[in-house]
Amino acid sequence: MYIDELGDFNEELLGQLLEWSPTLLVNGENYDKIFSLGLKVDVLVNGSGQEAQEDTKVVQGPADALMVAVNYLYEEKYPAVNVITRKFDLEKFAGFEDKINLVVFTERAKHYPIKSGFSVWKPAGSEFLIHGNRYLEVTNLAQNEDEIFIVVKDGFVEFTFSGQPIFISEPI
């Protein structure tokens, strides 16, 4: 797990995600807040000049901390990462979807890349936001005036499109 910006992220959900995350990376700018929560930080990203916990590795890079963290995990052969940040910026994450299994959590939603043919069971009324302007076909979804796709009836939804993976979001 990489915590870029914690903000007002739900602490219960944070605890659940940490149960599944064997390694915790933290942006140096948020280290003090994470440390105050009593969490053991494994890797401090772009935290120059900060005093880190014992056995905490410090990783520096020329790019912003998010890029440094995801590249570090990719190079260390981690298969997946959960990222917590305040705002989902599609341009920051585009390009990583083929390198590492990526799920980005913000305070209100989770965002993740999908490949054509992706299907998932959802109850009626569930919502999806599809990022980017591309032609795609969907089943069991209806788009509302806010460009949010809503599951029509309990069951599977499927996304079909050509080209690279796309990112979708759903509320948490």
Image (cartoon, grey):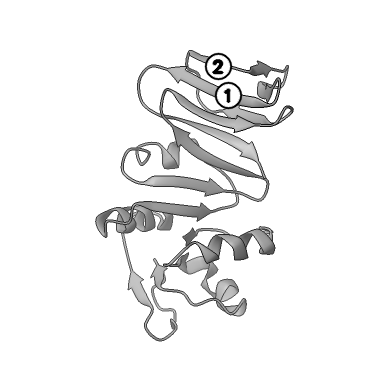
* Closer to us: 119 or 64: 119
Vertical order, 74 against 96 (above or below)? below
Q: Secondary structure at mark 1?
A: strand
| Left or right placement of residue 53 versus residue 108 in this view | left
Q: Which residue is mark 1?
A: 157
Q: Kindly tell me whether residue 154 is visible in this rendering.
A: yes
Q: Nearer the viewer, residue 165 or 32?
A: 165
Q: Quadrant of residue 163?
A: top left
**Amino acid under disc 1:** Val
Quick check: 167 left or right of 146? Answer: left
Q: Position of residue 151 (x, y in %)?
A: 68, 24
Instruction: Tell me if mark 1 has few (under 14), some (14-19) or many (20+) residues whose alpha carbon lies within 10 angstroms of its own.
Output: many
Tag 2 and tag 1, C-beta contact below 8 Å? yes
Whether residue 154 sits left or right of residue 100 in the image: it is right
Is 53 placed above or below 122 here? below
Above or below residue 126? Residue 101 is below
> Which mark is nearer the camera, 2 or 1?
1
Q: Residue 61's x, y, as percent?
A: 31, 61
- Residue 62 tag number: none
Q: Position of residue 102 (x, y in %)?
A: 43, 46
Residue at 58%, 35% (x, y): give it: 169
* Picture quarter with the C terminus: top right
- Which residue type carries mark 2? Val
Q: Is residue 165 left or right of residue 3?
A: left
- The foreground one among 135 and 28 is 135
> What residue did someone put label 2 on?
138
Q: Label 2: state its secondary structure.
A: strand
Confirm whether residue 62 shows in the render.
no
- Residue placed at 38% from the left, 16% from the top? 162
Instruction: Give the vertical position of 76 relative to 135 (above or below).
Output: below
Q: Residue at x 47, y 17 (%)?
A: 134
